[in-house]
Image: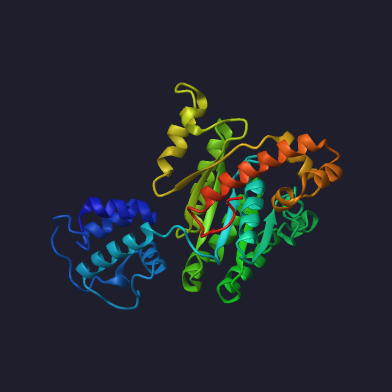
Amino acid sequence: MTYRQAQGLGAHFRIAQEAVDWLAATTIIDSGAAKAPAERGAAALPKEVRGHLHSRGVFSVAVKTSASAIGADLMRGYQMTKSSFPLTPPAALVTASKKGGTGKTFLMATVADLMTVNGYSYSVFQADDKMRLRTLIGAKVVELRPNPDLVMNNPALMRQAFTPFYTACSEAMASGKSVLFDIGANEVENAANFLTDVEIDEDLVSWGLPMIVFVLVQAETDAIASAAETIRRFRSAVPSARLVLVENLLERGPLGALRTTGPARHQFEKDLKPLLAGVTRVTMPAILPDFWEPYDNAGQRFLKALAMEPKEAAKRLNMEVGDVKIARRAVAVYFRSMHAALSQLIVLPKGGV
């Protein structure tokens, strides 16, 4: 294995550069240095590297092996994960961003509906002061925010509130239930701290449960900065998670269309772009509020909006039949586009409308 290949592995597995240098120095990677003793086996690897190798099922860290064998195992692990998408549920699916209003809950409602269409069972959690997800999907959504009055006297409750999510993840493979978690802007830090404290990364590996973290972003300065910080936090808290950057095109357009000399472009180039190695990117098409809000206000999820006949919808929404047809078509176009995008990540045979 060459040092260039090692750098690629480091980016893919999100291993710190120091760990890659350590591997090269011990000639687990062939960098031209003196050969390291064969005793420098799996158990001698830094924790970050051991965790990533173990998370890919490459080898048992309890077994001593030669430097060259470790190099081969590293490359096999890399090849395994290159084609890890689309994954088959159950899985832990998380939406997050440290900025509100970027479309996290809307995306999670879309994911939930696509899971329903494809017959996948799931449990749903939300940590957000707005709690809109229950309205959007009409399912039982477990709130994971503690009583703020109690937190004043017992700050530990802030992190303990996330325990039901951990429990659901621990049972997911046995139950076949995916775990959906929508994290509000003000709860990202608390959630990331909790996931770090319980060392969920190691547990996900032992459970065999994959995790996708969808990080929402829009083409404006604050949203870009918040997306970058969210990626950093989850990359640190759950290194084995697949990170997906979701560009919400509502009102702002794509990141690629940012003005070259504008502050948002500068923020993207400086803060977010350097983090995108190994991050999958998908686009969330815009759906105008005028088309969706009538359904939202009536507590109708995407599936119901698409299934209702125009006359029935007109009565329920207090709209003209013609306006309902236009709105319904907009919802169908959005849902079809999201099905195509999310099918790259999750096995979703149905949902193309």
Q: Position of residue 85 (x, y in %)?
A: 44, 57
Q: How many marks?
A: 0
Q: Residue at x 34, y 78 (%)?
A: 62
The answer to whether residue 141 is left or right of residue 4 is right
Furthest-top residue in this view? 261
The answer to whether residue 256 is left or right of residue 102 is left
Q: Nearer the viewer, residue 140 or 286?
A: 286
Q: Position of residue 192 (x, y in %)?
A: 57, 55
The answer to whether residue 26 is left or right of residue 353 is left
Q: Nearer the viewer, residue 323 or 128?
A: 323
Q: Nearer the viewer, residue 239 or 126?
A: 126
The answer to whether residue 350 is left or right of residue 2 is right
Q: Is residue 218 above or below residue 32?
A: above
Can residue 108 be seen at all in this image of the molecule?
yes
Quadrant placement of the N terminus? bottom left
Q: Residue at x 86, y 39 (%)?
A: 318
Can residue 16 be seen at all in this image of the molecule?
no
Q: Is residue 170 above or below residue 218?
A: below
Colouring used for the render: rainbow
Q: Position of residue 40 (x, y in %)?
A: 24, 70
Residue 240 in which image quadrant: bottom left
Q: Residue at x 80, y 45 (%)?
A: 313
Q: Position of residue 148 (x, y in %)?
A: 77, 54
Q: Nearer the viewer, residue 327 or 284?
A: 327
